[in-house]
Amino acid sequence: MAEPHELREKGLRLTPQRELVLSAVRSLGHATPEDVAERVRQTHPGINLSTVYRNLETLENVGLVQHTHLGHGGATYHAAEAKLHAHLTCERCGVLIEVPIEETSLLTQSLLNDYGFHTDLEHLAISGRCEDCFEKP
Amino acid sequence: MAEPHELREKGLRLTPQRELVLSAVRSLGHATPEDVAERVRQTHPGINLSTVYRNLETLENVGLVQHTHLGHGGATYHAAEAKLHAHLTCERCGVLIEVPIEETSLLTQSLLNDYGFHTDLEHLAISGRCEDCFEKP
DNA sequence: ACCTAATTGCGAAAGATTCGCACTTACTCA
DNA sequence: TGAGTAAGTGCGAATCTTTCGCAATTAGGT
């Protein structure tokens, strides 16, 4: 009667580290690998950063998490079951705005028609200036 | 009657390295700092990578070049006088498609209306799958 | 309980970018 | 035209992020 754990259903071994990485991503929303590691360390201080990286990759491969590039270097991870959304990031203050994917359907439709390009707005953020930062130059 | 050099007009000193960096960016189109360095080395073999980085930053500050994030780590630089365009990058094969900025005006308009967000599509690419890569999974 | 392959920890390596500092050089001005 | 000076350069080291190899550990099947 043991209900199969969601990780096992994906063919993954169930390790404390892996569970903690997954739940950290879920509770953090958008997080860098470093953020995730920090959160996991609260309950599992010894976790190695490599392990975090490897688990994020593994979890992404089975579709439980996703990463997005918000601008510079690092990727951020979020749970895959979160509602589909595009990301707006302010170049100035870094604030992150989530936008329902429907908001962008006119664009993705025309890119498809005109260029045969299948847009994936989840993977890369849209850059710009938020209202506040736009006003004060 | 010495006509002022464009770099001098921006208040910058005119060094061989700086001129070469600028002309490398102009002739390369979209280039990483490493690409730029390689090109500059053809005429100025001794140039240091730090110098390339510093000049790219300087040139960007005065508005002669711009950088764009195409996806992962590195930024790429292009001349600022190039026509305004958004960038589509294929996640799979990395091909880069340039799209006139008007193509995206419906999106930027609605992001402005709905979120007060001033979109800057030059700074971050739009990710997705090109036609070829979409067909073969 | 036992075996095997997956997973982890650790330290090193790789790649990209930045920084400090001493030396050089483009430009200013007398 | 010849200093003087501040910007710019080269060099090496430092950072930061991410990846890798390998030996030790451990989860899950039998």
Image (spheres, coloured by chain):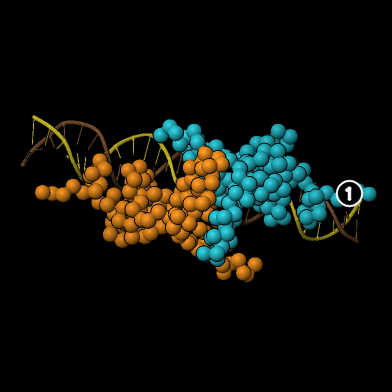
Chain colours: A cyan, B orange, C yellow, D brown
Q: Which of B57 and B98 is in front in this view?
A: B98
- Could you tell me which quadrant the C terminus of chain A lies in? top left
Q: In this view, does B7 lie to the left or right of B132?
A: left
User: Which residue in the structure is indicated by mark 1?
Assistant: A3
Q: In this view, does A40 lie to the left or right of B29?
A: right
Chain under label 1?
Answer: A
The 10 Å Cα crowd at callout 1, few under 14, some 14 to 19, many 20 or more, is few
Q: In this view, does B46 lie to the left or right of B73?
A: left
Q: Residue placed at 32% from the left, 43% from the top?
A: B62
Q: Which of C30 and B95 is in front in this view?
A: B95
Q: Residue placed at 44% from the left, 33% from the top?
A: A135
**Could you say which quadrant of the image residue B136 lies in?**
bottom right
Question: What kind of element bears circle 1?
Answer: loop
Q: How many badges with numbers are in the image?
A: 1
Residue A47 visible in the displayed image? no
Residue B113 visible in the displayed image? yes
Q: Residue placed at 52% from the left, 64% from the top?
A: A114
Q: Is residue A107 above or below residue A33?
A: below
Percent x, y of residue A87:
58, 45
**Which amino acid type corresponds to the residue marked 1 in the rendered image?**
Glu
Percent x, y of residue B73:
51, 51
Q: Residue placed at 78% from the left, 56% from the top?
A: A11
